[in-house]
Image: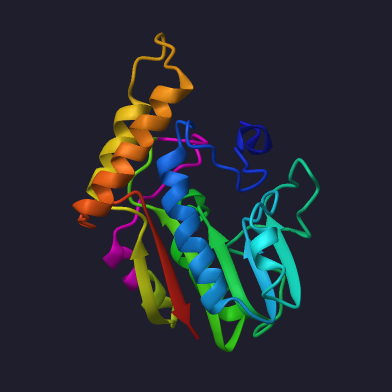
């Protein structure tokens, strides 16, 4: 199978409230923006950059933004074509290494994180996100799901000090996302009903927050 034809790439960070995937991106974007604001600096490498959908958030925090990916993106944003497990980059090259929703598609995910550690400068940070829950996607290149402790172990095995691991929403947000994704496809739901559904589950998640079940984690490691 041609992997290039099977990649699903974000083009930007737009996220209308009537979108089926609104809840997962609502919480992911909050966590990523905070991580970028708190930890991104200097020269940044984005592993699995795709179309660089987060460039508008990143460019104000860093001096250089380099993206690598296994194939060129639809808007030609990829600077280095390579595998995440074999970065053609010297040791200690970047102040920040960034990778979002890529790690689950890498067969040897530990080697990917090892490579992130290798190219990160001492004192630099690795910002990484990945799913605990999400349906199969980009098949057959969908290999892994991660718990909080899975991220901690993976970062520590590579040599990183774990700074934080943050859940992206709790069990109510997850439930809302599962419900809207499993509605019968032969029924057309008006946008207003999807909007009400999404806002209701954000309210429930805020009021009865419980992170034991979540959609994604954003983890920060320091070299």
Whole-percent x, y for residue 170 in the image: 27, 52
Q: Nearer the viewer, residue 195 or 76?
A: 195
Residue 212 quadrant: bottom left
The magenta-colored residue range is 136-153
In this rendering, is residue 190 above or below 129? above
Q: Nearer the viewer, residue 219 or 174?
A: 174
* Residue 108 seen in this snapshot: no
In this rendering, is residue 101 above or below 40? above
The verdict on residue 144 being magenta is: yes
Q: Residue furthest bottom?
A: 122
Residue at point 42% right, 68% down?
Answer: 219
Q: Is residue 206 left or right of residue 79?
A: left
Whole-percent x, y for residue 139 in the image: 49, 34
Which is the main secondary structure of the residues drawn in magenta?
loop
Q: Is residue 116 left or right of residue 171?
A: right
Residue at point 67% right, 50% down?
Answer: 50
């Amino acid at each position: 199978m041609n992997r290039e034809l099977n990649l699903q790439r974000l083009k930007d960070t737009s996220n209308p409230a009537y979108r089926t995937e609104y809840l997962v991106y609502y919480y992911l974007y909050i966590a990523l923006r905070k991580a970028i604001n708190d930890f991104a600096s200097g020269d940044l490498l984005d592993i699995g950059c795709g179309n660089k959908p987060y460039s508008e958030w990143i460019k104000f925090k860093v001096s250089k933004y380099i993206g690598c990916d296994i194939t060129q993106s639809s808007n030609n944003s990829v600077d280095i074509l390579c595998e995440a497990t074999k970065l053609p980059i010297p040791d200690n090259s970047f102040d920040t290494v960034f990778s979002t929703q890529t790690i689950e598609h890498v067969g040897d995910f530990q080697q990917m994180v090892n490579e992130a550690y290798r190219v990160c400068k001492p004192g630099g940070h690795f910002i990484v996100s990945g799913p605990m829950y999400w349906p199969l996607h980009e098949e057959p290149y969908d290999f892994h799901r991660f718990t909080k402790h899975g991220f901690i172990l993976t970062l520590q095995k590579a040599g990183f000090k774990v700074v934080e691991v943050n859940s992206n929403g709790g069990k109510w947000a997850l439930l809302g996302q599962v419900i809207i994704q499993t509605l019968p496809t032969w029924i057309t739901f008006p946008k207003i009903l999807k909007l009400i559904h999404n806002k209701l589950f954000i309210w429930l998640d805020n009021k009865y927050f419980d992170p034991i079940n979540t959609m994604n984690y954003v983890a920060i490691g320091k070299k």
